[in-house]
Amino acid sequence: MKIKINRNILWTETFVNELASLGVKYVSISPGSRNTPLTLAFVNNKKIRSYINIDERSSGFFALGLAKASNTPVAVVCTSGTATVELYPAIVEAYQQRVPLIICTADRPPELLNRGANQTINQNNLYKNHIRWFNDVGLPEPSIEKLKQLKDTAVKAVVKSTFETRGPVHLNFPFKKPFEPNTFTDDVENKVINFAGKLAPVKINILTGKMKNISGEKWFENIYKHIAKKEKGIIIIGPDHYDPKFLKNCELLSEKLNYPILADGTSQIRFGSHKKGNIITNFDAFLRSEKFAKENKPDIILQFGRTITSKALDTFLESISSLRFMINEYGDWFDPSDKATAAYACKPYLFCETMIKKISASSIKRSNDKWLTVYKNAEAAATKIKEAIIYKSQFPNECRAINEILDNIPEDCQIMLSNSMPVRDFDYFASYSKKKIVVYNNRGASGIDGITSTALGIAEATKKPTVLITGDLAFYYDLNGLLAAKNYNIPLVVILLNNNGGGIFEILPISKYGEVFKKYFVVPHQLDFSHFVKAYGGNYIKIKNWPALKKSLVKSFSRQQFSVLELKTSATDSLKLRRQYWKAVSLRLL
């Protein structure tokens, strides 16, 4: 018996059903004609939640946020032509941060390429410099052989994006018309339909990875031998989302070795109920002291996670010749100075766990904690100065805003940090908190595009209270992303630090160049963001003092719409405050 079908619909439904069976839960779709078969297949699949984002750039970053927060691969669908290029910024960020995205671009059939056909560009491996795997799926063919290849492609896409190489993968889908389900293209045997609907026996738990026994590995034993001999060491925890076991294990390792832990603001370890005895948060301030940096050079460094935020720490690492071992899940090289000794692929919690057992079974004893005490004393001194200069500073400024926010957000809250100054100020000024807080960022490529859309994706995936701390230019760049907040009632709370332009350039030497600096670098925009917020159905509040920030924050979390709390600041005054703090710390350490 033969059945009438549309080959495009059979093709895409087979593919999407396979993705759903492998644990894909979300898709972000941008409207178009050529991607009709993909759109219908995703929308009709009850296991996958579909989101529509008109702007492809916002769509890509929204998917990025969904993937970050859910730790699952998220599909992205768009039509052919320049629409595919609009996804590129989000793909670059996903590539740099190893976030699993499955990019599904619709395409014209091969015979239309290079013939002036409308909305047709060369999409073959379009993202080749920033993609983990590419496959041109080929034109749909309603045969068991080709459908099997398609299913294998779906499995490979999930495995590649989530485990083997982790990051974005690109599948290019060429289609010929017609696209609609009730327009038939073929008569096929019933067995073809049955095969298309039969899911592969492969099952993947995409939330877990394989563990590995590293005890006895040459590289591990080499690090142990150095640790056993060297008492002057530091542990650096860079940005990442670590296994909960890592925080406890890393602290225990620090206690056994008397090594201070320099914790990046986005490392997660500054927050939560765990012990924080050896955790240092003010290192950016006291490492600016030439005297301290010169007199307290470590002999060995263990670096976990991604590239650090702090410029002062980066400069310090560049100036010393210590052994430095980087440990992260994929053995990525996170060292701009290129002075590290080696990078090893290992889950950080497993490294700490194994090293603790090795040390406990050995004769290593660290009775002298003088080295650790020097760092802890510097931390205490910087904390007192920070409390006096930053926490008691006048309204408004970008520095004090960080802890005002931390003090007034609820338990189990999420924070998304924009690039430029917000993520830096968070690293400088975010103090310890017993609150359970999860911090997100787009520090892979460190662009200011797509920040709001990423935050919205994070909030939507978790349904937890979420705060975005952003600057005015980043907010301006992604105004289109606010449509998702309106359409899906995502109650994101946005703290908009508006210094009227590129305030980060104030810290660069170009800031001395008067009118040229102001006109071509700061570029004041004089925008009234309240109109944009209201146009997208949001709640806008202009903050006029610190108590008002507290009150508005608390109230915003009870709303069912997104809120924008705007603080108008001066980049120049905020920079003066930072420099006053850094100078005071350096003088204290003389």
Image (cartoon, rainbow, N blue to C red):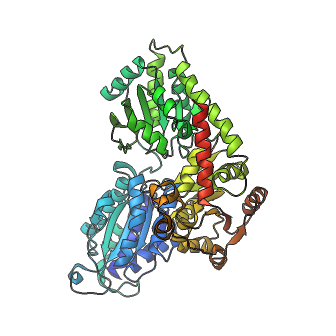
Location of the C terminus by quadrant is top right
**Horizontal placement of 29 versus 103: left or right?**
right
Work out whether residue 3 or residue 235 is closer to the camera in this orientation and state it.
Answer: 235
Location of the N terminus by quadrant is bottom left
Q: Residue at x 45, y 79 (%)?
A: 31
Dividing the picture into quadrants, the one containing residue 222 is top left
Q: Residue at x 30, y 26 (%)?
A: 218
**Horizontal placement of 259 versus 221: left or right?**
right
Q: Residue at x 70, y 71 (%)?
A: 539
Residue 165 in the image: above or below residue 218: below
Residue 390 in the image: above or below residue 227: below
Residue 365 in the image: above or below residue 195: above
Dividing the picture into quadrants, the one containing residue 144 is bottom left
Q: Residue furthest top?
A: 363
Query: Residue 183's spot in the image, x, y percent?
Result: 37, 88
**Horizontal placement of 153 versus 468: left or right?**
left
Query: Residue 125's spot in the image, x, y percent?
Result: 27, 66
Work out whether residue 332 or residue 576 is closer to the camera in this orientation and state it.
Answer: 576
Query: Residue 480's spot in the image, x, y percent?
Result: 53, 74
Residue 584 seen anywhere in this rendered image of the structure? yes
Residue 197 seen anywhere in this rendered image of the structure? no
Query: What is the tally of numbered marks visible in this picture?
Result: 0
Work out whether residue 152 or residue 455 is closer to the camera in this orientation and state it.
Answer: 455
Q: Residue at x 56, y 32 (%)?
A: 248
Query: Residue 512's spot in the image, x, y percent?
Result: 48, 59
